[in-house]
Amino acid sequence: MQTLLPLAADIGARLKDRGETVAISESSAGGLISAALLAQPGASTFYRGSGVIYTRQAFRGLLGLTREDLGDMRSSTEPYACLLARTIKGKLDAHWGLCETGASGPTGNGYGDASGHTCVALAGMLDGRPLEVSRTLETGLTDRAENMRRFAQEALQLLRDALE
């Protein structure tokens, strides 16, 4: 987690300067995105909350989404990450919604994605226009803890890039 803290500090400072907030939906990062942001002094001014959406129960219970909301989408894809970023943003009334969804390992997920696969997405407004961006990371690693760290870093970097 130590390697995530400088990036989270920069994000926290930028969000505070802008008077903006962020809400997080993460799965395979296991809470590392939120932990890095919450480690920043004054996090209560920019951090709205999060959910570790690791199971169907969390998907339904924390986000209030149903299978019908997904249509033909599946987990661990960019469209799914975008849906969750939009949903957590709206649920927690934040300026930004950030999502990570993937397969940390040591094996892949039930959808055929290899260990080290994640998709991250960000939903918000930039210069008065809606912004939604996503990207996929393939680490090629089976090391669960290292993948979790890299997934969190990828998500935080996506947010930082938008705030620059």
Image (cartoon, rainbow, N blue to C red):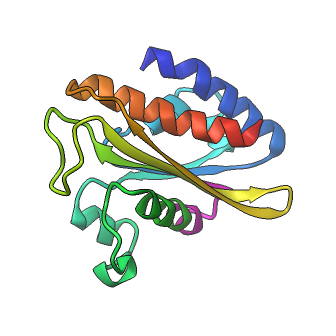
Q: Residue most toward the right? A: 127
- Furthest residue to the bottom? 68
Percent from the top left, x then y, of residue 4?
A: 50, 22
Residue 19 lies, with reference to residue 62, above or below; the image says above
Is residue 30 visible from the viewing direction of this image?
A: no
Q: Is residue 36 left or right of 112 when viewed as pictured?
A: right
| Residue located at (52% from left, 27% from top) | 39
The residue that appears at 26% across and 25% down in the rendered structure is 145
| Camera-side residue of 164 and 55 | 164
Classify residue 44 as left or right of residue 36. right
Question: Within the image, what quadrant is residue 159 found in?
Answer: top right
Q: How many marks?
A: 0
Q: Which region shows up in magenta?
A: 88-98
* Quarter assignment of residue 130: bottom right
- Quadrant of the snapshot with the C terminus: top right
**Residue at the image point whose x is 15% and y is 55% from the top:** 110
| Residue located at (58% from left, 33% from top) | 157
Residue 151's spot in the image, x, y percent? 40, 35
